[in-house]
Amino acid sequence: MLPPIEDLERTLSRLPGLGRRSASRAALALLREPDRLLEPLVLALQCARREVVCCARCGAFTVRANDPCALCTDPSRDGATLCVVEEPADVVTIESSGAFRGRYHVLGGKLSPVRHLGPEKLRVAELVSRISAEGIKEVLVAVSTDMEGDATAGYLAELLKPLGVATTRLAFGLPADSGVSYSDPLTLRRAIAYRVTV
């Protein structure tokens, strides 16, 4: 295999959802049709690199010309409720549900001693500043349900308690269209602990 093709495959394989074989197929398809696939991809990547930034206020993706982002400046959104997420992609996922109409705050990760990520490396100070400056009444912590996510949620709840802001967390339970027999023990324990009245 030629080094430029290997480099392309290796780079594509770093993308989420693309394993080695999928990256190889994608690389060969790009090279097979450079005018239809490769050139538009190169242009789109260059444009994204040049124009896409993280919002100075919330940390979500936006374009350089719209900073702060549309979610931060939309007057129809609930400015008293703030959803705290790990990454900018989480904002896109929650927005696609249509269930949340407040504002967002991206931490830029979660607490992780293994990866040397403490509160000082996350956007925690910015979160505290926003709560005071923007009159936030509720912080919805929407982070992963793994050990690091639980530690992050616990840390934020303790940090925010003296500020008099309500701190909530996404409910735990079974995924939609799933059965009990397909769930792992931890998911079932959380579903039982956070059960609701019907």
Image (cartoon, helix red, strand yellow):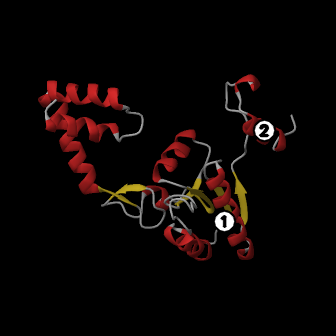
Give 100 or 83, whichever is nearer the viewer. Answer: 83
- Secondary structure of the residue carrying tag 2 is helix
The CA span between labels 1 and 2 is: 22 Å
* In the depicted structure, whether residue 64 falls above or below residue 39: below
Give residue 156's mark. 1
Which residue is at a point 49% across and 69% down the rendered structure image? 121
Q: Kindly identify which residue carries mark 2.
A: 191
Q: Name the element at disc 1.
A: helix
Amino acid bearing label 2: Ala
Q: Position of residue 32 (x, y in %)?
A: 15, 24
Q: Please indicate, yes or no, whether residue 25 appears anywhere in the rendered image.
A: yes
Residue at the (27%, 25%) spot, across then down: 25
- Label 1 vs 2, first from the N-terminus: 1
Mark 1 touching mark 2, by CB under 8 A?
Answer: no
Q: Is residue 164 left or right of residue 41?
A: right
Q: What residue type is labelled 1?
A: Leu
